[in-house]
Amino acid sequence: MKIAIRSDASPEIGTGHVMRMLALAQYLKKRGADVYFMSYELPDALRQRLHAEGLSVVAISEEPGSIGDAQRVIRHGKENCTTWTIVDGYHFKSEYQNAFRSNGMRVLFLDDYVHCERYSADVVLNQNCYADRSLGYCAESADTKFLMGAQFALLRDEFRSRKAPEREFNESISHVLVTLGGADPDNGTQKILEILEAVTEHQLEIKVIIGGANPHVEPLAAFIKKSRHRSSLVTSVTDMWELMDWADMAITAAGTTTMELCYMGLPSLVCVLADNQLRVVKKLEDLGIVQSLGDIRIWDEQDAYSKLVLFLENRSLRKEMGGRGSALVDGAGVSRVYKTLLEEAVSLREACISDERQVWEWANDALVREMSFNQAEILWKDHQNWYRQQLKSAEVLFYIASDDDGPLGQVRFTKTGDHSVISMSLASRARGKGLGSCLIHKATVEYFNKLAVDEVIGYVKTNNAPSLNSFRQAGYDQTEESSSSDNNVVTFRARRNSFHETTI
């Protein structure tokens, strides 16, 4: 796939939109996608970070969020055969999405608080912990897909490549991490440091992270130099995992960092910097994952200080928070979004006589034969007889899967009594990209929608690791393993009543 990401960053906007897009870009790039950014404004430090990740940046000169902006991205996308455009930013509205849809361009649209009147993107993603359809999303089309909730949290490579640490929750805290995002235009960081400075009962080591868009470096450095605690300023961070692993607690804003803190099981005090963060803090506090310090714009300094002191001294509270955060964010959000993009780019149609030779060639592929229950080469005449019987049979539904570059593989369902048996094979070019699970999931959903069958069963040889993984990731339940004289077989089942709730 070729992916364009349209997002901006500045002291006013912040850096959160681009940083979460970096997380998705890293994952897409590792799976062979060609990813590039299109931006009107980026701080130099963030631009350099993208370049260091091997991601190019195309400059946008049109007014951000305007129709001219959309037309520029669409024109570039068509010239470069872009598969998906991913849009993240509050200045992109309904008309912006419509421009892509009306030009036949696929769009994934990031949202946090239903900031558009209507949504016409192919996929809408809200990764916040409170997100679900009850927020009142209004879709232009019934085929718009909504990905809602923390299960889709976009974590960068530095988190996904390592497990969250096994934390020891000591009676007292010594290591404090302060991070209020990449911009912090109102210098809420200093307000936090002033409260920490009032803590005299504990000797703290404080690391203060500021981003490349932060305009308050000099006053913060001067304040830290005079601190009673052992404090340091950390800039140009490339490994947040290491800093969160070091910390005993964090004080943060209610942005994308909260999802990283949840994954790391790091207990946190969270403050509000903007209106769109109010709902995040309330939900996380209701779930018992964080404690709120309130709205930093209408700061009650004494109340915040009291909450901080209680937090420092309450080991059991911190331990409970860490465990609940880890349970909320499992680190697989980017893979779920990736598989959705793959699935949405795949189309299914019923097989016809013109597919006869293509299916025969797939069936005789060396790897397919090796993993089949009958490994003998299939003769052309035998295939012709079999294939034409399949097309005529009322008990068989035979799909050909394709993407923009052509056929990807086949999925076949054969009804047997009160259930159906699924069979799937991929073209060689489609292997190793996660497409197996996408084809199985998409075809199974369509099959259940089309026919009154309650259960689909798949049989896979135990040495066929890619197919075993594909069925598991597609939402099938592994129910049993059996042996015959020739093969060891794993049985997978998908049931109508539960499968539609499955998210790959």
Image: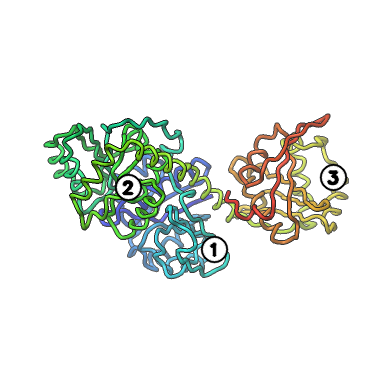
Residue 304 visible in rendering: yes
For mark 1, does the 10 Å Cα neighbourhood hold few (<14), some (14 to 19), or many (20 or more) residues?
A: some
- Say which amino acid is labelled 3: Trp
Q: Secondary structure at mark 1?
A: loop
Residue 353 at x, y percent in the picture? 80, 57
Question: Which residue in the structure is indicated by mark 1?
Answer: 144
Residue 78 visible (yes or no):
no
- Identify residue type, mark 1: Thr
Check if mark 1's residue and mark 3's residue have beta carbons within 8 Å: no
**Mark 2 touches mark 3? (CB < 8 Å):** no
Q: Is residue 242 left or right of residue 339?
A: left
Q: Is 5 left, or right, of 227 in this rendering?
A: right
Q: Which residue is mark 2?
A: 291
Separation of residues labelled 1 and 3 (CA atoms): 42 Å
User: How far apart are labels 2 and 3 at the CA level?
Assistant: 68 Å
Marks 2, 3: nearer the viewer = 2
User: In the drawing, does residue 244 fall left or right of residue 378?
Assistant: left
Query: Is disc 3 placed on a helix, strand or loop?
Result: helix
Q: State the scheme by which the image is colored.
A: rainbow
Q: Which residue is mark 3?
A: 380
Front-lying residue, 290 or 1:
290
In contact (CB < 8 Å): disc 1 and disc 2: no
Q: Position of residue 252 (x, y in %)?
A: 29, 46
Residue type indicated by callout 2: Gln
